[in-house]
Image: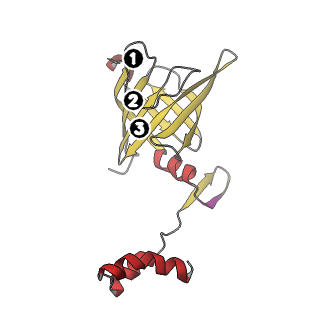
């Protein structure tokens, strides 16, 4: 940080008379860099400086239990029962007991509000894409997706005949951490 940037950052406190050494120190301290460790099977892990998207994927990483699901304005407890989503680096597995897992690729964009989310999967030679928005608050994840291969859901709301699906998920603690 240059002297001019430091001066401009502290100037409002100096003018108001509240600037003391403790206040100026807090203002001038830069936020620590965030690094992400990427595990690679059979190879040594790699440490990278996390971009906004990489850090967002790290926040999603793990297994999430669907606690509520809504489609086109109607609650769907029958589909939400035993449904889990397991996020890893760019891959999402939809898990439901008694059914084979469905694996999709996912992408996040955190430059928008709410954050953009999309998943892509192949089915019978076709590429299917669902776009929507998501929000993570602690161990709760909200995810709302628009209809397949159409417009993005832009809010956390479903209504009759809109084709949107909304999930409310809770993070599942990994085995052995209880």
How far from the left and from the top, in percent, is residue 5? 52, 77
Position above or below: 165 against 140 = above
Question: Which mark lies nearer to you, 3 or 1?
Answer: 1
Total labels: the figure holds: 3
Q: Left of 5 or right of it: where is 44?
A: right
Q: CA distance from mark 3 to mark 2?
A: 11 Å
Q: Which residue is mark 3?
A: 64
Q: Nearer the viewer, residue 12 or 70?
A: 12
Image point (47%, 81%), residue name: 7
Mark 2 = which residue? 167
Residue drawn at (46%, 17%) of the image: 163
Q: Residues within 10 Å of mark 1 (few under 14, many from 20)?
A: some
Secondary structure at numbered mark 3: strand
**In which image quadrant can residue 27 be found?**
bottom left
Nearer the viewer's eye, disc 1 or disc 2?
1
Mark earlier in primary sequence (3, 2): 3
- Depth check: give the residue in front, 37 or 11: 11
- Left or right, 163 with respect to 23, comes to right
Residue count near mark 2 (Cα–Cα under 10 Å), binned few <14, some 14–19, many ≥20: many
Residue 54 % position (x, y): 57, 51
Q: Reply yes or no: does residue 47 show up in magenta.
A: yes
């Amino acid at each position: 940080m240059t002297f001019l940037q430091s001066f401009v950052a502290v100037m409002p406190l100096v003018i108001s008379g509240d600037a003391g050494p403790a206040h100026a120190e807090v203002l001038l301290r830069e936020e620590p860099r965030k690094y992400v460790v990427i595990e690679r099977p059979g190879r040594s892990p790699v440490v990278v400086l996390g971009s906004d998207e990489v850090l967002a994927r790290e926040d999603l990483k793990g297994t999430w239990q669907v606690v509520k699901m809504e489609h086109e304005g109607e609650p769907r407890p029958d589909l939400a029962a035993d449904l889990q989503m397991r996020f890893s680096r760019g891959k999402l597995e939809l898990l439901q007991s008694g059914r084979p897992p469905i694996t999709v690729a996912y992408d996040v964009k955190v430059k928008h509000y709410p954050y953009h989310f999309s998943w892509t999967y192949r089915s019978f030679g076709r590429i299917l894409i669902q776009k929507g928005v998501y929000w993570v608050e602690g161990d709760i994840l909200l995810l709302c997706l628009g209809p397949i291969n159409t417009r993005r859901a832009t809010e956390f709301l479903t209504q009759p005949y809109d084709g949107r699906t909304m999930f409310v998920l809770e993070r599942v603690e990994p085995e052995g951490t209880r």
